[in-house]
Amino acid sequence: MSAKPTIQFSSLDMPGSGVLVLLAGDGGALPASVPADAAGPLQKVLTVAKFKGRSLSVVESMAPAGSPFDRIVVVGTKGEGAFGEEDWLKLGGTIFSKLKGAETVCVWTEGAAASASATDVATIGLGLLLRAYKFDRYKTKKAKPGEEEEQSETAMTVTLATADPDAARAAFAASEAVAEGVAMARDLVNEPTNVLTTTDYADRIAALADLGLEIEILDEAKMRELKMLALLGVAQGSPMPPRLCIMRWNGGTEGDAPIAFVGKGVVFDTGGVSIKPAAGMEDMKGDMGGSAAVVGLMATLARRSAKVNAIGVVGLVENSVDGLAQRPGDIVTAMSGTTIEVLNTDAEGRLVLADALWYTQERFKPQFMVNLATLTGAIIVALGSEHAGLFSNNDELSARLHAAGLATGEKVWRMPLGAAYDKMIEGKFADIKNVGNGRAAGSITAAQFLQRFVNDVPWAHLDVAGTAMGSPANEYNQSWASGYGVRLLNRLVADHYEAG
């Protein structure tokens, strides 16, 4: 894996070497606080480039005459509207993209079109870390004949110079915890399934006990005892044994009801007997993207010592094909006692979540549950990769998730639920069936299915099929796996559910 940059903070003292990054405002105006010997050599460069300071536009000056710097990079911050949180995140990502080969970097955070608070400066640092992420552990770097072996990437130190470095440093402690959680989620989704088996995944979750999380892992025998036959039915065609992993963070007031997050962890989805087409099936190593977000979130809450009681539950299975695999037409009984007619074995994630959700609400009596799942291709048809689909039985929880999405850039769009859709999953030979009627309302009928297993607990389902993997790269993510959901849910918790 590539080394991540070291982020540190200082007062507004101009360094004497390395790479200098300046932020420009409207018209390309440079910060007044930058000494003339640094700003002077840039004026002609900016004029020739017709630089106007447009947000995220960049001009570079290599070894500028009369300057001690190797490079000076000027990044525009003048946008169409107010400069928001995601703009600072994109700014950090854009800056990192221009630092290849640098060892020491100073980012002069004054001079932006919007005044940068300590939190904004910390968010620039978060953007730097998110953009720096690479998943290259399986790439071998061999020298060509006559060349030396390629060395690992240069370690980089980035100093964010700001008026209040102590406040920025304090704010960055939480941002760094978020970056670690996102990187963990990305790693999990990017891993191939021959490495990230159900048992390896469970072992990685068990290791999070080092962060202070309480970990409990249920094996097949325990789940059979609990009558989780919906989840177990999905797993029965694979030699990889199923696991249900429970993570607990007790950072709130003792006795307070926890908040709960539940994730679909299908480490690979062939579709089962209802097998998928071969083209693109390799991407189904990412069908555990919902669970990865839950794991990354729980690690984030622990790393930043969040003042909340939180539960994370993930069901880990492989949906494979052999002579023991579940067949279309099979009927299984979920932990709740609901009978399910399995008409399509490729609609397996909802079967895993049915038992995980029921177990979570029954055992932990949470304030609310949010589940995440790469559940349906239909949500990609509806929303593309710009939004995750949000389905909920609770308006307040929905509104809070929507606001958190707008703040972080991990946006959600609320989709409908209703009795008419619920009728579409009524079974012919069992209580319900695991697919609706044809292709119509595919993501909605999947959500209606899940709602059968939440009782009256406030609940939201996030269909992240279009956002967890394979979405277009942006300024702060160049990875196939995005880590979607960690920042969204961390913001939800921080804004509404932590003790004062």
Image: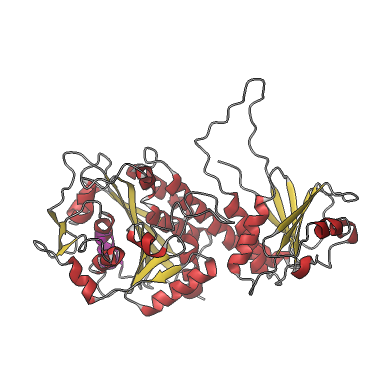
Q: Residue at x 69, y 50 (%)?
A: 98
The front one of 472 and 456 is 472
- For residue 398, side relative to residue 82 (left or right): left
- For residue 91, side relative to residue 240 (left or right): right
Q: Residue furthest top?
A: 146
Question: Is residue 11 placed above or below 73 in the rendered structure?
Answer: below
> Does the rendering let one see residue 222?
no
Q: Residue at x 61, y 26 (%)?
A: 143
Q: Residue at x 55, y 45 (%)?
A: 134
The front one of 91 and 295 is 91
The front one of 247 and 426 is 426
Q: Residue furthest left?
A: 429
Q: Main secondary structure of the magenta part?
A: helix
x and y percentages locating residue 395 in the rendered image: 37, 79
- For residue 290, side relative to residue 42 (left or right): left
Q: Tell whether position 362 is magenta.
A: yes
The front one of 411 and 180 is 411
x and y percentages locating residue 214 in the rendered image: 39, 56
Question: Is residue 241 placed above or below 304 in the rendered structure?
Answer: above
Q: Quadrant of the N terminus?
A: top right
Which corner quadrant of the image does residue 321 belong to? top left
Question: Is residue 280 placed above or below 295 in the rendered structure?
Answer: above
> Does the rendering let one see residue 290?
yes
Question: Is residue 413 placed above or below 480 in the rendered structure?
Answer: below
x and y percentages locating residue 410 in the rendered image: 49, 64
**The magenta stretch spans which residues?**
354-364
Q: Residue at x 78, y 61 (%)?
A: 50
Q: Residue furthest bottom?
A: 396
x and y percentages locating residue 139 in the rendered image: 52, 34
